[in-house]
Image (tube, rainbow, N blue to C red):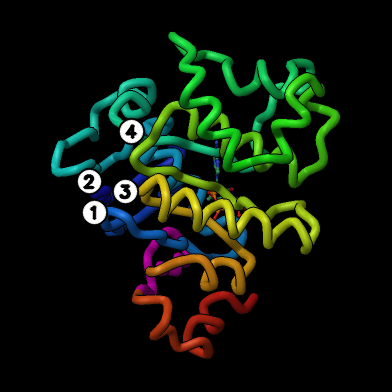
């Protein structure tokens, strides 16, 4: 469904992604793993159209979207939950969900809230007063209201207590299976990344150095790329 081919991205003179090839098959969950600063967020931003690649191509369902701006990519079905979640602290949960929607669809809102029963009871609460786990669920819900075909999640477990990580994992699996949304997630927490995904990619210094089917992963080999 989503393909990045020979993608290179630079910040000024510094090359951050170098000839990256990655794909997310339709209906799959894919984890992108790697240490701090290797380029994972940069790849998600390039896929979302927030950064312009120096070289390479991005396709969605076979259509070349490399030159599309972010809003057009969103309309094509890419949803993005950034690192840090970017919840509006002084808007309520409900307002956060509806922000930027050209038309509100109560049926879709209801469907999404069914996936997050906890949010249903917090609709009038200010976004800034939610816990990290609740904010993460709100950020995912906000992306889902726009009915994406594929969701990009940047470090969904960051700053979340272990008991809530299990909830996030369940939500991701449910979205994938029940709503048929493909998922590409960036994650440093290895157990989570491998536990939730069908395929994995490991990035080091802007390059993909290992990839495969999660159930066949050679853990020792993978950990070599994550060691400091
Ligand atoms: N706006 C920017 N200008 C210049 N350099 C940047 C910018 N954003 C990121 N970088 C650099 O690009 C490299 C890759 O950063 P990126 O955020 O993509 O890594 P990451 O793997 O997502 O790391 P993290 O897990 O810390 O988010 C880093 O060396 C970072 O310092």
Bounds of the magenta segment: 200-211
| Mark drawn on residue 77 | 4
Would you say the beta carbon of the disc 3 residue lies within 8 angstroms of ligand 1?
A: no
- Quadrant (top left, top right, bottom left, bottom right) of the C terminus: bottom right
Q: Residue at x 51, y 33 (%)?
A: 111
Q: Is residue 208 magenta?
A: yes
The local secondary structure at tag 3 comes to strand
For disc 3, the marked residue is: 8
Crowd rating for badge 3 (residues with CA inside 10 Å; few <14, some 14–19, many 20+): many
- Splitting the image into 4 quarters, where does residue 62 fall? top left
**Separation of marks 1 and 3 at Cα, in angstroms:** 6 Å
Few, some or many C-alpha atoms within 10 Å of disc 4 (few <14, some 14-19, many ≥20)? some
Report which residue position mark 2 lands on. Answer: 56
Distance CA(mark 3)–CA(mark 4): 23 Å
Q: x, y (%) of residue 183?
A: 42, 51
Instruction: Please report contact status of discs 2 and 1: CB closer than 8 Å, yes or no.
Output: yes
Q: Are marks 2 and 3 in contact (CB under 8 Å)?
A: yes
- Give the residue drawn at x 43%, y 83%: 217
- Pointer 1: what residue? 6
Label 4 SS:
loop
Residue 44, located in which quarter of the rendered image? Answer: top left
Q: CA distance from mark 1 to mark 4?
A: 22 Å
Mark 1 or mark 4, whichever is nearer to me: 4
Q: Secondary structure at mark 2?
A: strand
């Amino acid at each position: 469904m989503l393909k990045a081919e020979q993608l290179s991205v630079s910040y000024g003179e510094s090359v951050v992604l170098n000839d990256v090839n990655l794909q997310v098959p339709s209906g799959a969950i894919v984890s992108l793993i790697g240490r701090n600063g290797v380029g994972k967020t940069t790849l998600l931003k390039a896929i979302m159209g927030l950064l312009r690649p120096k070289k390479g191509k991005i396709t969605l369902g076979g259509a070349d979207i490399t030159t599309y701006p972010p809003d057009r990519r969103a309309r094509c079905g890419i949803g993005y939950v950034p690192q840090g979640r970017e919840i509006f602290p002084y808007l309520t949960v409900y307002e956060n969900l509806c922000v930027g929607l050209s038309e509100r669809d109560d049926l879709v809102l209801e469907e999404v809230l069914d996936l997050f029963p906890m949010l249903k009871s917090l609709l009038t609460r200010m976004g800034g007063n939610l816990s990290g786990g609740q904010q993460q669920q709100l950020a995912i819900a906000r992306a889902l209201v726009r009915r994406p075909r594929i969701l990009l999640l940047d470090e969904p477990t960051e700053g979340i207590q272990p008991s809530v990580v299990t909830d996030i994992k369940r939500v991701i699996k449910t979205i994938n299976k029940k709503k048929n949304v493909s998922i590409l997630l960036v994650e440093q927490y290895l157990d989570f990344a491998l536990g939730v995904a069908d395929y994995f990619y490991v990035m080091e210094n802007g390059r993909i150095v290992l990839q495969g089917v999660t159930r066949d992963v050679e853990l020792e080999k993978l950990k070599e790329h994550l060691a400091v």
